Amino acid sequence: MLEGIDYWEELRESPSQMETCFAVFVNVLELDERGEPINEKHAEHRAAVWLYRYCTGHLPPGEPDIEAWECQLH
């Protein structure tokens, strides 16, 4: 999804946007009763969707928009 997008160049000077990308990953991530991740790939995917939108100004085709709870900072 991020092939051809120089996201490091986009985020290097914007640490608050890096924080938001990380927040999306952590907010979507679910853990089992032992604290082991159960949907790591999905959380990674949603963070990539956010990053794609940030870098290009639009969502990848067919992806639902990022919801407010996904990018909420705690």
Image (cartoon, helix red, strand yellow):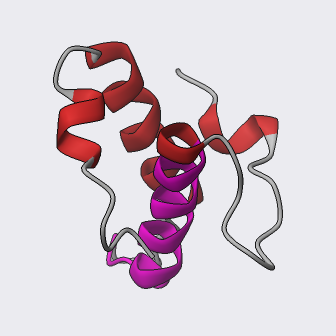
* Residue 74 among those drawn in magenta: no
Does 44 lie within the magenta span?
Answer: yes
Residue located at (41% from left, 69% from top) = 44
Work out whether residue 71 or residue 31 is closer to the camera in this orientation and state it: 71
Answer above or below: position of 10 versus 60.
above
The image quadrant that residue 15 belongs to is: top left
The residue under the point 32% across, 74% down is: 3
Compared across the picture, whether 63 is left or right of 23 comes to right
Say which quadrant the N terminus sits in: bottom left
Where's residue 46, x and y in %? Answer: 56, 64
Q: Which residue is pictured at 32% across the width and 78% down the height?
A: 36
Residue placed most toward the observer, 64 or 60: 60
Could you tell whether 28 is left or right of 29 in the image?
A: right
Magenta residues span 35-53
- In the displayed structure, 49 sits above or below 66; it is below
Image vertical order of residue 36 relative to residue 9, above or below:
below
Prevalent SS, magenta region = helix
Rendered location of residue 35, percent (x, y):
34, 70
